[in-house]
Amino acid sequence: MTSSAAAGQRGFRHELLLHHSIQELVEFVVPMVRGGVVAQEPTLLLVRPETAEAVLQQVGTSPYLTVQPALAQPGRPALHVRAAPQMLASYARVVHQEPVIPPSQWPEWRRLEAVLNLALSGHDTWAVCAYDRSTLTDEMVADLHASHHLIAKGGGDQRSDRYQHPVDFLKQHRNSPLDPVECTAPAVELADPSAAIARATVAGFARHQRLPTAEIDNLVFATHEAVTNALVHGRPPTLLRLWAQPDRVTVTVTDSGAGPTDPLVGLLPPGPMNGPGPGSRLGLWLSHQLVDVAHRHDPDGYTIRLAATHPVDHTG
């Protein structure tokens, strides 16, 4: 199989492959890798061991082929956005066998898939995101069609007729659903706390949980940023809620303002190319690197949710 739409073109080519078996995945990857080796194009496979073994059996080793383990867990999307440009700078072709994304993490993951089209727009890279179709809902599939330029089909690929500009897509999906813990009574609720009180409160509760010290420090920093932003940019009252679980501490900060209007909030690093809005603020961007972050805009105000957990594999 060859890819007439992607091979030989310049620019960032973001392709979606929905496969139903490892065999189907390998049937797509092998011709792509062979084409890269023949063209002497550095090719990277981020795949699971069984996939790597099947591909290497047919293609063999090559100085133009690098094989590394795929992500075992989704991790924090902003970390992937940060790492991707440097990683992809060395490769012309990349296949990533995507991890299974829990529904609770999908709202932030789809933001990642969309914003990669902006973060990597200056790269001449053909990047294929390979998902096991059986792990996806129809809504997830629709999101992926909207965030990838190309769709693998049969013996080749085609332009996605459902692709949306990343900013338009992110504007439609800027709200994350409630975390189930938010439907329970919080361990603490503070009205109009100062940043110092917020830091001390979160640190005190988090230290009683089985979380690494670094993760606690990250949550304290992110809470400080959220409360400061609410006090400076939001509208009173400001309400901080905290839920403490054995392996997780969740904090929400709500104010009566409209919240960040930038759909890229927290995903792109601060800089002149990323606009002057809230999405370019250093504190929000750093918070997305350090803890799990979600945003929700309601008629009565804006909520940012922060969570610290036992880290798994956030960088792959």
Image: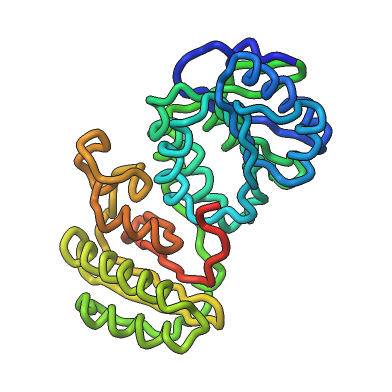
Image position, residue 85 (x, y; %): 41, 36
Viewer-proximal residue among 17 and 83: 83
Q: How is the image coloured?
A: rainbow
Image position, residue 9 (x, y; %): 51, 12
Side (left or right) of 124 relative to 132: left
Q: In the picture shown, does residue 40 fall above or below 218?
A: above
Q: Quadrant of residue 297?
A: bottom left
- Total number of numbered discs in the rendering: 0
Image position, residue 16 (x, y; %): 62, 30
- Say if residue 298 shows up in the picture: yes
Viewer-proximal residue among 137 and 218: 218
Q: In the picture shown, does residue 220 fall above or below 140?
A: below
* Residue at the outermost left position: 232
Image position, residue 162 (x, y; %): 56, 25
Q: In the picture shown, does residue 91 fall above or below 22?
A: above
Viewer-proximal residue among 278 and 100: 100
- Say if residue 161 shows up in the picture: no
Question: Residue at 45% of width from left, 36% of height from top?
Answer: 116
Q: In the picture shown, does residue 311 fall above or below 268?
A: below
Please state, as top left, top right, bottom left or bottom right, where the N terminus lies in the image: top right
Q: Quadrant of residue 226?
A: bottom left
Question: Residue at 45% of width from left, 81% of height from top?
Answer: 186
Question: Residue at 45% of width from left, 62% of height from top?
Answer: 292
Viewer-proximal residue among 113 and 136: 113
